[in-house]
């Protein structure tokens, strides 16, 4: 199986660097799959799970990204994430509480700025919970 190098970097740390056989991420226009030899491109990422299949194709790593940029070059894919965390490190109880707080913010909003902040927080918590579910289904 053909492989390529992949780096996943957030503002805090490098989460992954190594050879993979496939990457699936939430691009701005929808889900994108990358295999070796993919056409070069740059796209914005939406919050959600990013899945990377190992070079041997036997295992898969799931990483939550809150957004960022995906760059595909002939032999290297680079993900510059706004924030990222391995799915197994996400705290489901903490995220569920953040979701409840965002929903409460929506109920109590008084202006457009508060509404937008609440919607963004709600979208992020939902994407994190979906990442946890994808990780649990793979494990």
Image (cartoon, rainbow, N blue to C red):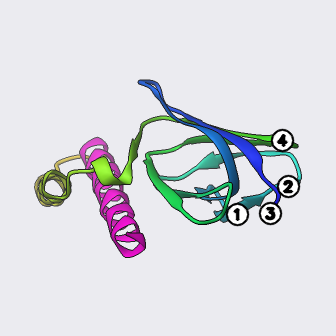
Of tags 4 and 2, which is closer to the observer?
A: 4
Of tags 3 and 4, which is closer to the observer?
A: 3
| Residue 72 sits above or below residue 39 on the image | above
Please tell me which of labels 3 and 2 falls first in the chain. 3
Residue at the spot 37% in from the left edge and 69% down from the top edge: 139
Secondary element at tag 2: loop
Cα–Cα gap, marks 1 and 4: 15 Å
Please tell me which of labels 1 and 4 falls first in the chain. 1
Horizontal side, residue 78 vs residue 10: left or right:
right
Secondary element at tag 3: loop
Residue at the spot 11% in from the left edge and 57% down from the top edge: 104
- The residue range painted magenta reads 113-139
Cα–Cα gap, marks 3 and 2: 14 Å
75 vs 73, nearest the viewer: 75
| Residue 98 sits above or below residue 130 on the image | above
Horizontal side, residue 8 vs residue 85: left or right:
right
Mark 4 lies on residue: 75
Residue 80, image quadrant: top right
Please tell me which of labels 3 and 4 falls first in the chain. 3
Cα–Cα gap, marks 1 and 2: 9 Å
Q: Can residue 88 be found in the magenta stretch?
A: no
Q: Residue 33's mark?
A: 1
10 vs 20, nearest the viewer: 20
Residue 1, image quadrant: bottom right
Disc 3 + disc 2, Cβ < 8 Å? no
Q: Position of residue 37 (x, y in %)?
A: 88, 54
Cα–Cα gap, marks 3 and 4: 14 Å
Disc 3 + disc 4, Cβ < 8 Å? no
Q: Is disc 2 surrounded by few (<14), some (14 to 19) or many (20+) residues within 10 Å?
A: some
Q: Is disc 1 surrounded by few (<14), some (14 to 19) or many (20+) residues within 10 Å?
A: some
Mark 3 lies on residue: 1
Of tags 3 and 2, which is closer to the observer?
A: 3
């Amino acid at each position: 199986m053909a492989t390529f190098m992949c780096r996943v970097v957030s503002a805090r740390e490098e989460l992954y660097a190594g050879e993979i056989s496939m990457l699936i991420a939430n691009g701005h226009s929808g889900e994108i799959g990358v295999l070796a030899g993919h056409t070069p491109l740059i796209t914005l990422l939406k919050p959600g799970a990013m899945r990377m299949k190992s070079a041997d194709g036997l295992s898969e790593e799931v990483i939550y990204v809150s957004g960022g940029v995906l760059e595909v070059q002939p032999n290297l894919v680079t993900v510059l994430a706004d924030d990222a965390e391995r799915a197994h490190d996400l705290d489901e109880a903490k995220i569920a509480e953040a979701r409840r707080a965002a929903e409460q913010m929506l109920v109590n909003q008084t202006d457009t700025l508060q509404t937008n902040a609440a919607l963004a927080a709600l979208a992020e918590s939902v994407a994190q919970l979906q990442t946890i579910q994808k990780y649990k289904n793979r494990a």
